[in-house]
Image (cartoon, rainbow, N blue to C red):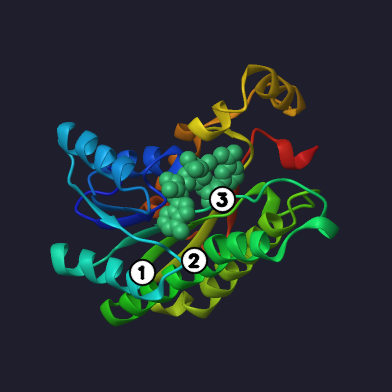
């Protein structure tokens, strides 16, 4: 098992990439705190992990609320003694549309959850890591954080920001036994994406060099590897998990 005996938290773990990753973290032997604003989904994920023999607990956390984020880290430490691994994954995108028509509210919401939320989580986790002498962070960025993404202004700006936070923290804390990396998924088949319907999914698949979308398992595998000691010499990297989409 890659993460045996470790303690972990993951935000946005009630569905999609976060759900699959939380389950995989547990399967690899870590105790995991599932954090999300979606209580029903989070409790279901915890029940499924527990039924499969893993160790998990749910906490309702809104990543835009600094007090709730600090309490999330405190909860892991109170329960399991330390925090080894953190996945900052909660995120969403605004409704697509032209930059000159983007409402300030929509901008603020996306930046608040995807960028400020990631910063607040990293700040709380880093405080704990510095005090205990180490730890590992993986942020969920996006291909939209590495290249132009027309009609997704706030999302693209936020995810470019997540890449900046990742690289900066990696170097700032490199001598303190703290690694910080990100994944940049391409278009991944999540429940939310399935709502777009078969025709739209077919269209997106045709744009991919592989001719298909990615799966949450394929993203979770990358996140778990980055969390594990197998990635001990890897920090500040943004792992593209996109079936080659960034190259075309
Ligand atoms: N699905 C894709 O194609 C894709 C591609 C690239 C990057 N991503 C990124 O992957 C991450 C997960 O996305 P997903 O596709 O699994 O979506 P998802 O909607 O299935 O999961 C996102 C989770 O975040 C939670 N969340 C939203 N706002 C929150 C808040 N303020 N505090 C705490 N939790 C909150 C939601 O309740 C949800 O459970 C996101 O950061 C997303 O930007 C997804």
Residue at left offset 73%, top offset 42%: 246
Q: Which mark is residue 29?
A: none
Q: Mark 1 or mark 3, which has the lower sequence index?
A: 1
165 or 149, which lies in front? 149
Instruction: Judge left or right: residue 47 versus residue 72.
Output: left
The quarter of the rendered structure image containing the N terminus is top left
Q: Name the residue under label 1.
A: 69
CB of mark 2 near ligand 1 (< 8 Å):
yes
Give the image location of residue 157, x and y in percent: 70, 62
Quarter where residue 101 is shown: bottom right
- Disc 1, SS: helix
Front residue of 21/157: it is 157
The numbered mark, 3 or 2, whose residue comes first in the sequence reads 3
Is 173 left or right of 165, judged from the image as shown? left
> Which quadrant of the figure contains the C terminus?
top right
Q: Which residue position is annotated with label 2?
A: 117
Rendered view: 142 above or below 216: below
State the CA–CA distance, disc 1 to disc 3.
Answer: 18 Å
Q: Is mark 3 within 8 Å of ligand 1?
A: yes
């Amino acid at each position: 098992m890659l993460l045996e005996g470790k303690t972990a938290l993951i935000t946005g773990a009630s569905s999609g990439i976060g759900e699959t990753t939380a389950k995989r973290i547990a399967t690899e032997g870590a105790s995991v705190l599932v954090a999300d604003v979606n209580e029903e989904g989070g409790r279901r994920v915890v029940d499924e992990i527990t039924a499969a023999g893993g160790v998990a607990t749910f906490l309702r956390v809104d990543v835009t609320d600094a007090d709730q984020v600090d309490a999330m880290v405190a909860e892991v430490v109170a329960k399991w003694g330390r925090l080894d691994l953190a996945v900052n994954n909660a995120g969403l995108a605004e409704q697509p549309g032209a930059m000159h028509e983007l409402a300030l509210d929509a901008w603020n919401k996306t930046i608040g959850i995807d960028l400020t939320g990631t910063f607040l989580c990293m700040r709380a986790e880093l405080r704990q890591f510095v005090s205990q002498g180490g730890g590992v962070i993986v942020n969920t960025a996006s291909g939209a954080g590495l290249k132009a993404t027309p009609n997704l202004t706030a999302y693209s700006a936020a995810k470019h920001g997540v890449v900046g936070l990742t690289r900066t923290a990696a170097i700032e804390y490199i001598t303190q036994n703290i690694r910080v990396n990100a994944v940049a998924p391409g278009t991944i088949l999540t429940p939310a994406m399935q709502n777009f319907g078969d025709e739209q999914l077919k269209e997106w698949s045709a744009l991919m060099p592989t001719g298909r979308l990615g799966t949450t398992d394929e993203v979770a595998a990358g996140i778990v590897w980055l969390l594990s000691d197998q990635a001990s010499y890897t920090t500040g990297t943004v792992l593209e998990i996109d079936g080659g989409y960034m190259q075309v």
